Image: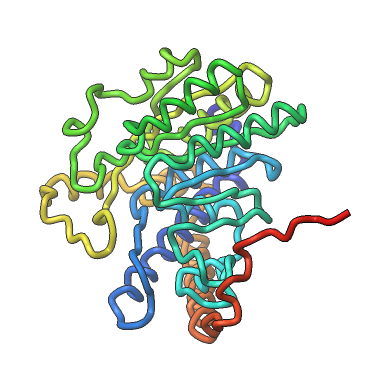
């Protein structure tokens, strides 16, 4: 798919969503540095906006997403209400999961995001089940599961890939290779340079893509989604990107060479795409300022909503934990 096949409206939406994700997470950075604002561990994906935006934008509303602890970009690209997301991260009762999930275990079934999980590699077996259900019910929808390069070494991920390959399930595996698994470099935990090459062993196509090029991600996502949707079985996409902040906001990345950060900052998916759209005439400085202003307003409103929301009361402690068996 070339730039001529991506409409100017879609190009603008891709850019706007990346800006929204970046500014939303920058607000979380600021709030996490204040006392009593952001309980728990904040794990962000600053610098990876091209992957979440490009991949999710290629899906239909019926497609199911299973994601991991760096999920904000996936949720926002899916159209989840930002007010409810911010309130949940703040552990407030008005949050998408009533303040019980926080940032690491979100679920948003109303937008077909089955789950997020901070348990490394936990999403792939559950995504396998969702894809099996889609195949069993002869649906046209597919399931997409996101995981990092560190999780790619988990046995659960390999088992899911193997079964998906055997059963020809409509499951798209998306490895967001951001060069770091915690504080370990890729070569310290992975025996192969290219994770996508593992796809061949499981009878599925695999390909890498520049994760900081949102249109390249979108184009490959469209291709692989159609492959899965057509009954040909699973596929593996490896999106090559970079984690610009620590593993969590408590991690100051002392182990990262500042020159490496500087080099990847020059490949920022947002600034690169902004330059492209200016050159194409899709955007001008006035439109860019309007997008920034709109996003800043929306993020400020989400912060205010979260601050004004109450914490869940003790009466909600056991709600949502059990399903009452049906009688009759």
Quarter holding the N terminus is top right
Q: In which quarter of the image is residue 142?
A: top right
Q: Which residue is drawn at 46% across and 34% down?
A: 174
Quarter holding the C terminus is bottom right
Q: Does 198 appear above or below 56?
A: above
Question: Between 319 and 293, which is closer to the camera in this rendering?
Answer: 319
Q: Quadrant of residue 233?
A: top right
Find residue 166 and report its horizontal and vertical position in percent.
Answer: 55, 15
Q: Quadrant of residue 25?
A: bottom left
Residue farthest along the right direction in this orientation: 328
Find residue 53 and report its horizontal and vertical position in percent.
Answer: 50, 47
Q: In this view, does 252 lie to the left or right of 85?
A: left
Question: Between 44 and 272, which is closer to the camera in this rendering?
Answer: 44
Question: Between 30 and 120, which is closer to the camera in this rendering?
Answer: 120
Please count the marks in the image. 0
Q: Which residue is drawn at 55% across and 82% down?
A: 314
Find residue 293 and report its horizontal and vertical position in percent.
Answer: 49, 71
Q: Is residue 134 left or right of residue 103?
A: right
Q: Which residue is drawn at 38% across and 74% down?
A: 38
Q: Does 293 appear above or below 138?
A: below
Q: Does 140 appear above or below 27?
A: above
Task: Report the colour scheme.
Answer: rainbow
Q: Residue at x 26, y 56 (%)?
A: 245
Find residue 284 and report its horizontal and vertical position in percent.
Answer: 48, 56
């Amino acid at each position: 798919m070339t730039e001529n096949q991506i409409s100017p409206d879609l190009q603008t939406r891709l850019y706007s969503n990346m800006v929204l994700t970046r500014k939303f997470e920058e607000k979380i950075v600021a709030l996490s540095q204040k006392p009593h604002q952001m309980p728990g561990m904040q794990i962000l994906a600053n610098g990876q906006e091209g992957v979440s935006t490009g991949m999710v934008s290629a899906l239909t509303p019926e497609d199911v997403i299973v994601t991991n602890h760096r999920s904000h970009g996936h949720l926002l690209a899916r159209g989840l209400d930002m007010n409810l997301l911010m309130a949940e991260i703040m552990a407030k009762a008005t949050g998408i999961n009533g303040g019980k999930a926080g940032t690491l275990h979100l679920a948003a079934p109303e937008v077909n995001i089955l789950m997020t999980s901070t348990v490394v590699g936990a999403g792939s077996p559950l995504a396998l089940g969702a894809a099996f259900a889609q195949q069993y019910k002869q649906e046209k929808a597919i399931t997409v599961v996101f995981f990092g390069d560190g999780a790619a070494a988990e046995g659960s991920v390999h088992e899911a890939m193997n079964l998906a390959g055997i059963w020809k399930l409509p499951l798209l595996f998306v490895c967001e290779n951001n060069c770091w698994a915690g504080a370990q470099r890729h070569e310290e935990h992975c025996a192969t340079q290219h994770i996508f090459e593992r796809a061949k062993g499981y009878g599925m196509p695999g390909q890498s893509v520049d994760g900081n090029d949102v249109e390249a991600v979108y184009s490959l996502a469209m291709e692989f989604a159609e492959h899965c949707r057509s009954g040909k079985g699973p596929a593996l996409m490896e999106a090559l990107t970079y984690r610009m902040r620590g593993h969590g906001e408590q991690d100051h990345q002392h182990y990262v060479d500042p020159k490496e950060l500087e080099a990847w900052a020059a490949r920022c998916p947002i600034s690169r795409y902004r330059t492209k759209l200016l050159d194409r005439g899709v955007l001008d400085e006035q439109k860019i300022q309007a997008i920034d202003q709109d996003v800043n307003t929306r993020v400020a409103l989400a912060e205010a909503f979260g601050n004004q929301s109450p914490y869940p009361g003790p009466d909600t402690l056991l709600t949502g934990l059990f399903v009452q068996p049906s009688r009759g």
